[in-house]
Amino acid sequence: MPTMADVARNAGVSVATVSHVLNGTRPVLPHTRQAVLDAVDELGYTPNTLARSLVTSRTRSIGLAVSAISNPYFTEILQGVEAGALEHGYSLLIADPHDDPVHERKVAQLLHERRVDGMIVAPSADPRELVSYLGRHQVPTVFLDRVIDDVGGSGPQRFDQVCAENTEPMAGLVTHLAGLGHRRIGLVAGLPGLSTTAERIAGYRQGLTAAHLPHDDHLVVHGDSEAAGAERATAALLALAEPPTALVTANNAMTIGTLRALREHGVSVPDDLALCCFDDFAWADLFSPRLTAIAQPSREIGAQAVRVLLERLDRPDRPARTVRLDCTFVHRTSCGCSDSGQRARPSQPSHSQKGTVS
């Protein structure tokens, strides 16, 4: 098996120069760098990552802890994380915390024991043990999709966070339905305790206020971010003495559950009830009617999380930050609009631009 010394002899440079080229630790003249890369290709040299990690105390690996990996939204986030990691020469160790606080803490410890350089985590609804472990062991971490405002006064601002805008896009769905004449607009909200759930409920209420509609707590039900829960929650809305004429679902899994409940109750969309959903997905355009939705930049969220983590590894003392990415309103027909003139357009005006940092 060829060694770094073999590469150096073939390229006519020192071993130190080969190391600088392969590890990016010091600028190297372009023609020298190319000579080293040509020698690597010619000899079939493969760096000894284990030996390098012993010297640098870096494994060039990232731990990713995301629940419901089978969910298309998180699958696309995973693809973004993977592409970003590979681009920078990092490998991934992936675990599913199952949105369980106890298991989440164990997953973090497992990844930490595998000596990952840092972690990207979508925290559960109760991440106190997770935050305590990561803080105690000073693990460079980026929270993904769900943000943490405060955890027992432990100072979550030590951690970077990357997520989508939630409040303004949800408000946009509600005002769109109100503009079509709906006065009783229901919300199938996510799992209580998640920041995404709280922010989308806030957006729903903001939209009602903007449309001068009253708030009715009976029109907000929790589908717990999964299909079966949304099916039960939607059935409860339909059983009201005065059921809603329009619905907004707060994630793609709950949209499926809501559609099942509507079908079982013989409710036609959009003839009997208008429907909009938070989270676009690949087959949303194949439903009949086609689903009007908020599309999150899921792959970019994953890729951005990697960039933020690598910046943290390079500059451990820099201030923590939260990056929020804008969503897109995808106008189809489940809201009751026709296909004529249909187009994708930005969500309702947001107070933050794509990539806003707070």
Image: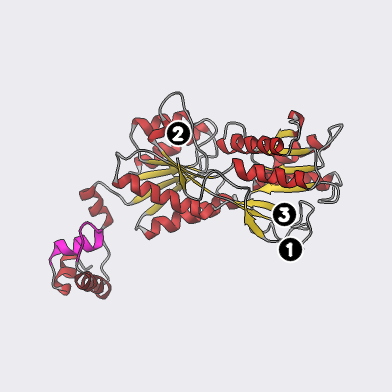
Q: Secondary structure at mark 3?
A: loop
Answer with left or right where residue 354 lies relative to residue 137: right
Callout 2 amino acid = Arg
Local crowd size for mark 1, using a 10 Å CA cut-off: few (<14), some (14–19), many (≥20): few
Q: Residue at x 82, y 38 (%)?
A: 238
Q: Quadrant of the N terminus?
A: bottom left
Give the secondary structure at mark 2: helix
- Residue 98: image quadrant is top right
In primary-sequence order, the first of circles 2 and 1 is 2
Q: Earlier in the sequence, mark 3 or mark 1?
A: 3
Q: Who's the residue at 68% across and 61% down the image?
A: 343
State which quadrant residue 265 falls in: top right
Colour scheme of this structure image?
secondary structure
Predominant SS of the magenta segment: helix
Are dots 2 and 1 in contact, CB under 8 Å?
A: no
Bounds of the magenta segment: 14-28
The stretch drawn in magenta includes residue 25 = yes
Nearer to us of marks 3 and 2 is 3
Out of 167 and 74, give the one closest to the viewer: 167
The amino acid type of the residue labelled 1 equals Gly
- Disc ID at residue 341: 1
From the image, tell me which residue sits under label 2: 105
Q: Is residue 116 visible?
A: no
Left or right of 277? Residue 11 is left
Q: Percent from the top left, x then y, of residue 163? A: 51, 44
Query: In the visual, does 59 lie left or right of 182?
Result: left
Q: Which numbered disc, 3 or 1, marks the residue closer to the eye? A: 1
The reply to whether callout 3 and callout 1 are in contact (CB within 8 Å) is: no
**On the image, which quarter does residue 339 sit in?**
bottom right
Q: Which residue in the protein does label 3 denote?
A: 291
Tell me how far mark 3 sits from mark 1, CA to CA.
16 Å
- The residues bearing labels 3 and 2 have C-alpha atoms spaced at a distance of 37 Å
